[in-house]
Amino acid sequence: MQTFKKVSASKVTISELMLPSHSNFSGKIHGGYILSLMDQIAFACASKYSGKYCVTASVDTVDFLNPIEVGELVTLKSSVNYVGKTSMVVGIRVTSENIQTGKVKHCNSSYFTMVAKDNEGNSVAVPTLILSNLEEIRRFCEAVKRINSKKEYKAHEETFDYTTEENIKNLTSFNIKLDL
């Protein structure tokens, strides 16, 4: 029996105060800690939507746009942007707020591909996604573009010959020294 769910059924928001124990050697919040929070919210979002245990299959680019300071309130917002047969693309936006000044910074955005699993660890079908507004349609279409770009990149990488004379010559424009 096919089930349907709206994007709104997937939304999860978490906020956490950043403590000194979350910081790196330069006094900023450690990127690995933020990635851990992102993985947690991706799991919660995908599991909430699918009703199943979910695992992380891949993480698209994570660009750290602004540093997060100790004492700031970090908020992560997530929603399912795309569904396949057993997978979901969860969009995550991370912001930080200086709780004294109220200034909010966009720190990063990323997309986690999550796969729904049954109790035996087999991939299982997820509900069909209901798109209810133009923003949800935009996010879905952008996810399709990223998926197609990934497929094209993988196909190129599988056929690319690193050993050709032309490729080796092109390497001289980089900050390397060839010692073959």
Image: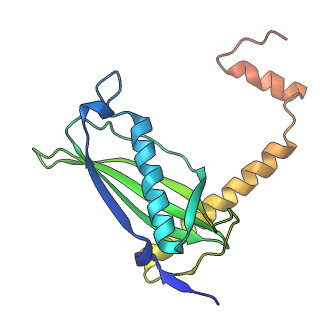
Counting from the top left corner in percent of width and height, residue 146 is at: 61, 59
* Residue 43 to residue 157: above or below: below
Residue at x-position 77% and y-position 25%: 170
The residue nearer to you, when weighing 159 against 24, is 24
> Please, which residue is most extreme toward the front here?
119
Q: Quadrant of the C terminus?
A: top right
The residue sitting at the right extreme is 164
Query: Image check: 179 left or right of 27?
Result: right
- What colouring does the structure picture have? rainbow
Quadrant where the image shows the N terminus = bottom right
Lateral position of residue 27 relative to residue 109, left or right: left
Residue 58 in picture, x, y percent from top left? 61, 51
Q: Is residue 164 left or right of residue 102?
A: right
Q: Residue at 52% x, 74% y: name it.
A: 51
Residue 109: in sight, yes or no?
A: no
Is residue 6 shown to the viewer in this render?
Answer: yes
Q: How many marks?
A: 0
Q: Nearer the viewer, residue 179 or 42?
A: 42
Point 47% across, 58% down: residue: 42
- Pinpoint residue 120: horizontal percent, then vertical percent: 68, 64
Instruction: State the residue at coordinates (79%, 43%).
Output: 157
Left or right for 124, reference 142: right
Q: Residue furthest bottom?
A: 1
Residue that protrudes farthest toward the left in the picture = 100
